[in-house]
Image (cartoon, rainbow, N blue to C red):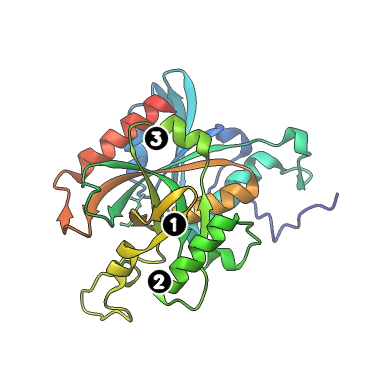
């Protein structure tokens, strides 16, 4: 097998992976990810013990034990471009031999369990601020999948094409269903939803401060999108900035991924949760107890 060149698998002098700054031994198979670096300590404060704390750029990592289970919590910053780095480097840590720089054989490969614990805005009036939502399908408006051969199901292709038409886009957004296993394990009692991943917070989520939008009715186009299939009616329930990237890369690399969303704002009713921190903290505790 040909070794992966130093320019592709970039390692630091101590042998750690370039951006995450981690060595293969550092991480556990179950990983909780958060956008905000300050949220890492909000998760690890519940650990019985912390064995490793490492950071580089927006990637802050704490590894420790929660009720006897070894867990890793990592911050990612915002956007699917960071998720490209996160998923590729996490996968490399477990599935590439850093000494020989070769992919481990199939029977030795590890399936990571990756759980995003993030904030999100509701698109529909019936999804209250303060609720927790688990993402079934994610639809990516970002360009990450222009660069990977993601294989989508017939339904996913049709949903993506429908969103393209509804928004009048020049490209077809990608659509990916996350891990059913993890969603069932972690999302019990949460609102099941379909999450739109946007490549920005203001214009791409229909917010106007000073700049006008190319499509002034963008939010209602998101809200009114429907796709009917044998599985029932598909609508977009909420939006954020990472989930579709996680689901697509997770599928291609063979990892189980789910996205749990603390709904802190509702764009249909105009509400912003006064206690958004409590909504996030409750989601953290729920996640730790179920993971
Ligand atoms: C925007 O405020 C950020 O919050 C959401 C979005 O996806 C974006 O990253 O998630 P996090 O709270 O996990 O960062």
- Image quadrant in which the C terminus is located: top left
Question: Which residue: 49% across, 61% down?
Answer: 159
- Cα separation, mark 3 vs mark 1, equals 24 Å
3 or 2: tag closer to the N-terminus: 2
Disc 3 from disc 2: Cα separation? 29 Å
**Is label 2 in a helix, a strand or a loop?**
helix
Residue 129, given in percent of the width and then of the height, sits at: 21, 47
Q: Which mark is residue 218?
A: none
Dot placed on the residue nearer the N-terminal end, 3 or 1: 3
Which residue is painted at 70% across and 37% down in the image?
109
Q: Secondary structure at mark 3?
A: loop
For mark 1, what is the residue? 228
Check the image and report above or below for 97 versus 124.
above
Q: Position of residue 10 (x, y in %)?
A: 65, 55
- Pick whichever, 232 or 114, lies toward us: 232
Viewer-proximal residue among 178 and 208: 178
Image coordinates of residue 220 in percent, x first then y, are 28, 68
């Amino acid at each position: 097998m040909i070794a992966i060149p130093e320019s592709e698998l970039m390692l630091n002098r101590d042998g750690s992976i370039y951006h995450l700054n981690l060595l293969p031994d550092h991480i556990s198979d179950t990983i909780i990810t958060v956008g905000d670096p300050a949220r890492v300590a909000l998760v690890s404060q519940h650990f019985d013990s912390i064995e490793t704390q490492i950071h580089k750029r927006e990637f802050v990592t704490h590894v420790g034990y929660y009720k006897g289970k070894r867990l890793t919590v990592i911050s990612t910053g915002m956007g699917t471009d960071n998720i490209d780095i996160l998923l590729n480097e996490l996968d490399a840590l477990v599935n590439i031999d850093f000494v020989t720089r070769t992919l481990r054989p199939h029977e030795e490969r590890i399936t990571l369990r990756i759980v995003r614990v993030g904030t999100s805005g509701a698109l529909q009036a019936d999804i209250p601020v303060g609720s927790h939502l688990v993402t079934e399908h994610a639809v990516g408006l970002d360009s990450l999948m222009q660069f990977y051969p993601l294989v989508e199901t017939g339904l996913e292709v049709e949903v993506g094409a429908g969103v393209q038409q509804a928004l009048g886009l020049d490209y077809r957004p990608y659509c990916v269903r996350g891990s059913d296993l993890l969603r069932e394990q972690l999302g019990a009692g949460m609102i099941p939803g379909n999450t739109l991943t946007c490549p920005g917070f203001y214009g791409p989520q229909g917010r106007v401060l000073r700049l006008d939008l190319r499509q002034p009715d963008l939010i209602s186009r998101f809200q009114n999108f429907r796709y009917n299939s044998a599985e029932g009616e598909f609508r977009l329930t909420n939006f954020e900035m990472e989930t579709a990237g996680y689901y697509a890369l997770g599928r291609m690399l063979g990892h189980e991924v789910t996205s749990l969303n603390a709904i802190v704002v509702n764009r249909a009713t105009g509400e912003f949760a006064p206690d958004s921190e409590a909504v996030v903290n409750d989601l953290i505790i729920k996640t730790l107890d179920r993971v």
